[in-house]
Image (cartoon, rainbow, N blue to C red):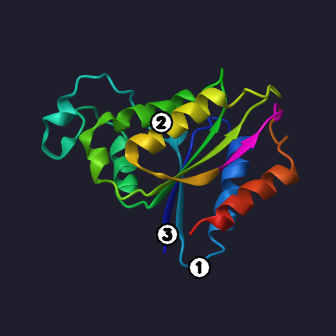
C-alpha cells in the first residue's frame, strides 16, 4: 500500500494544473491499496520561511508561525510518496508551493517516511528549456532526501485555462497508475 500526497500549487480553480493533478489521482486510485490525498496549497495560509532557525530549538521542531503548515507537516508525516503539481511562472513553481517547499527547512523533515517524489508541471511557453531550473531543483531535493523518482509529467503550451489536451491528461493518469 502506498500513501500518496499530492501538493497542488495553482491558484487558478479548475485550471490546467488541477486537471492534471486530478487525472493523476484517478490513475493512482485504480490500485485499491493506494491511499491518495490532494491538497491545494492555495486553500491554506502558508507563511514563507523567515530563516530564523527557531524550529531547530523548539519542541517537536515546530515553527513559531501560526498557519496551516501544521496540516501539511501532518500529511507529510504519513506519506510514502509526494507528488508536486504546479504551474510554471518565470521558470519556477508557484509562489504558494515554493512557500511550502521552503518551510521544509525544519529538522522535522528528517522524520517523514517519504520514499518517492514525483512532479507534474504545466507551462504556457513552448521553450525546450522551460522546465530546466525546476528539474534541477527537483533532482537536488531527491538527492538531499535520498528519494526515488516517481516520475514526471511536463506539459508545454497550455496557456489558457482548460488547454491541457486529453493526451496530457492521459500522461498524468498513467503516472498515477504506475505508482506502487
Q: Which of the numbered marks, if any, corresponds to residue 145? A: none
1 and 3 marks in contact (CB < 8 Å): no
Callout 1 environment at 10 Å: few (<14), some (14 to 19), or many (20+)?
Answer: few
Question: What's the residue at 40%, 31% (across, down)?
Answer: 102
Between the residue at mark 1 and the residue at mark 3, the CA separation in whole angstroms equals: 10 Å
Which numbered disc flags the more N-terminal residue, 2 or 3? 3
Residue at which label 1 appears: 32
Residue at which label 3 appears: 2
Residue at which label 2 appears: 140
Question: What's the residue at 32%, 34% (across, down)?
Answer: 105
2 and 3 marks in contact (CB < 8 Å): no
Residue 114 place in picture, x, y as percent: 41, 56
Question: What's the residue at 49%, 69% (across, down)?
Answer: 2
Which numbered disc flags the more N-terminal residue, 2 or 1? 1
In the image, residue 158 lies in the stretch drawn in magenta: yes
Between the residue at mark 2 and the residue at mark 3, the CA separation in whole angstroms equals: 23 Å
Callout 1: helix, strand or loop?
Answer: loop
Q: Quadrant of residue 63?
A: top left
Between the residue at mark 2 and the residue at mark 1, the CA separation in whole angstroms equals: 32 Å
Question: In the figure, is residue 90 to the left or right of 38?
Answer: right
Callout 3: helix, strand or loop?
Answer: loop
In the displayed structure, 126 sits above or below 142; it is above
The front one of 179 and 19 is: 179
Residue 28 place in picture, x, y as percent: 63, 66
Residue 69 place in picture, x, y as percent: 37, 41
In the displayed structure, 169 sits above or below 29; it is above
Region of the chain picked out in magenta, as a range: 152-159
The front one of 135 and 92 is: 135
Question: What's the residue at 45%, 51% (across, down)?
Answer: 147
Amino acid at each position: 500500500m502506498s500513501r500518496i500526497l499530492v501538493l497542488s500549487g495553482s491558484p487558478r480553480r479548475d485550471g490546467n494544473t488541477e486537471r492534471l493533478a486530478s487525472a493523476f489521482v484517478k490513475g493512482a486510485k485504480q490500485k485499491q491499496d493506494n491511499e491518495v490525498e490532494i491538497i491545494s496549497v492555495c486553500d491554506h495560509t502558508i507563511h514563507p520561511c523567515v530563516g530564523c532557525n527557531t524550529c531547530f530549538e523548539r519542541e517537536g521542531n515546530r515553527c513559531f508561525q501560526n498557519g496551516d503548515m501544521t496540516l501539511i507537516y501532518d500529511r507529510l508525516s504519513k506519506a510514502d510518496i509526494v507528488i508536486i503539481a504546479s504551474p510554471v511562472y518565470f521558470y519556477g513553481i508557484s509562489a504558494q508551493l515554493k512557500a511550502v517547499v521552503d518551510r521544509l527547512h525544519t529538522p522535522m523533515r528528517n522524520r517523514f517516511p517519504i520514499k518517492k517524489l514525483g512532479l507534474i508541471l504545466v507551462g504556457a511557453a513552448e521553450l525546450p528549456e522551460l522546465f530546466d531550473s525546476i528539474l534541477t531543483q527537483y533532482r537536488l531535493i531527491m538527492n538531499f532526501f535520498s528519494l526515488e523518482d516517481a516520475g514526471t509529467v511536463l506539459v508545454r503550451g497550455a496557456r489558457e485555462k482548460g488547454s491541457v489536451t486529453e493526451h496530457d491528461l492521459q500522461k498524468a493518469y498513467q503516472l498515477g497508475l504506475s505508482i506502487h
